[in-house]
Image (cartoon, rainbow, N blue to C red):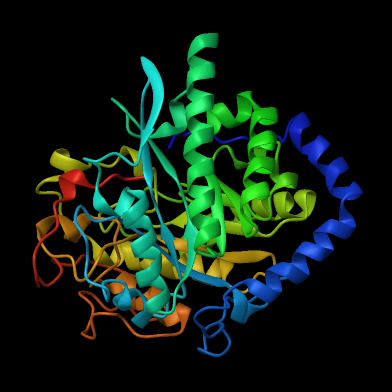
Amino acid sequence: MVTTRFSSWGPCLAAAAARAAAATAAILAFGTLFLAGCGSVGAGADAGATGRSTGAREAAVPGVSIRPGERIRGVSFSAPRREMPPDALQPAASAAADWVAVIPYAFVDPADPRVAFDRERQFWGETVPGVAKTIEYARASGLSVLLKPHLWVRGQGWPGEFEPRTDEQWETFLSGYRDYILRFAEVADSMDVEMMSVGTEVDLVALARPDYWRALIAEVRAIYGGRLTYAANWDKYQLIEFWDALDLVGVDAYFPLTDDPTPTVEALVEAWRPWSDELRDVARVTGKPILFAEYGYRSVDGAAGRQWELPEGRRARGLPSNGAAQAAAYEALFRVWWDRSWFAGGFAWKWYAGSPAGDWIATDYSPQGKAAETVMASWYGGDASAGRPPAMPIPIGGGAAGSTGTATARGPAPSPSGERPGT
């Protein structure tokens, strides 16, 4: 995740506008397909049914209309090191999630950008057998699946700043990345996965080689018949040139809203305004619904600001938790987005198998066992998965203040050092 905000569209969206105008019939056909399939596994209540409202209605986007009951209520699953119990995803379903993003990582070294994936020593949940079993368990818990490959770059983690430097490196990387995506397209097809992403935040590569991505998308469609998206970072999604080849505009929605340690819900709703205007314009120009392929906030001071600058890993040890800040950010996001007809829903970052425990979870992105889970479950139409009061309940109609303690420790603690954050 980087900090640049683009205020102009550039030539790529002008070209996209022309393509969108030429493809009106296809867009309308997609709308029918999306409404027929989205949310078909797992039912959730809309905002009106839960008594929640964002207030003023957002202007519609012609050709894009997602019914509230079909909006994606998703969580991003953190693949475990070892095989998990079959019911490990049931807590997400209990919190009224009806989709889960299953994430098989691949790895690349910038000095020698061969793409490595499905390795023997990799986390079980990231291998082909582990991904297949996770999808099977998701089905058993009533969850639809987004298969969402991520790239992990040696020495920097986040792929948003990765770009090959020589022609030879470009050839090596693009060939290996193609093999990676097509292998998981085969998995998606064989298991009737509802949606697949062709990448996550590989934005410099996406901007530099749009023709490569169009060709790759065509190859994926020849294998897999479900819906496709790409998960672009919040500051690059406007510049992607191949949205017309996909079914949804995927955005990893870590937009910086405020540096206030514990802002009110109302202040956060207001801070969303310029970003929501930009996202609506992209929906209008592309004719595609906006999907938050990732959204989320850590439970720390300043969670709704420049998240990528907050301490992580070992540097976060001893950092005070602030569940109220996380919960307020969740509440504001739902108030702003949940009633918009061109918003397809999203996937909370991130969700662990079972009930995660340990000091690290108190400042992690996961909403599990915190006030944010109660907020998410309420908007999704269910109850908090843990079946217990959250660490810091907040009134639905008001702002948040104060901070929380750690989540209740229950069960074995997963190792946070091995988790691979996507932001």
The percent coordinates of residue 126 (x first, y second) are 32, 49
Viewer-nearest residue: 108 or 340: 108
Looking at the image, is 74 positioned above or below residue 94?
above
Viewer-nearest residue: 209 or 49: 209
The percent coordinates of residue 368 (x first, y second) are 26, 69
Quadrant of the snapshot with the C terminus: top left
Looking at the image, is 260 positioned above or below residue 135?
above
Viewer-nearest residue: 319 or 248: 248
Residue 30 left/right relative to 173: right
Looking at the image, is 206 positioned above or below residue 67?
above
What residue lies at 19% left-to-right and 56% top-to-bottom?
A: 82
Looking at the image, is 212 positioned above or below residue 400?
above
Residue 4, visible in the rendered structure: no
Viewer-nearest residue: 407 or 259: 407
Residue 382, visible in the rendered structure: yes
Res 299 → quadrant: bottom left
What residue lies at 37% left-to-right and 67% top-to-bottom?
A: 328
What residue lies at 79% left-to-right and 49% top-to-bottom?
A: 285
Residue 5 left/right relative to 2: right
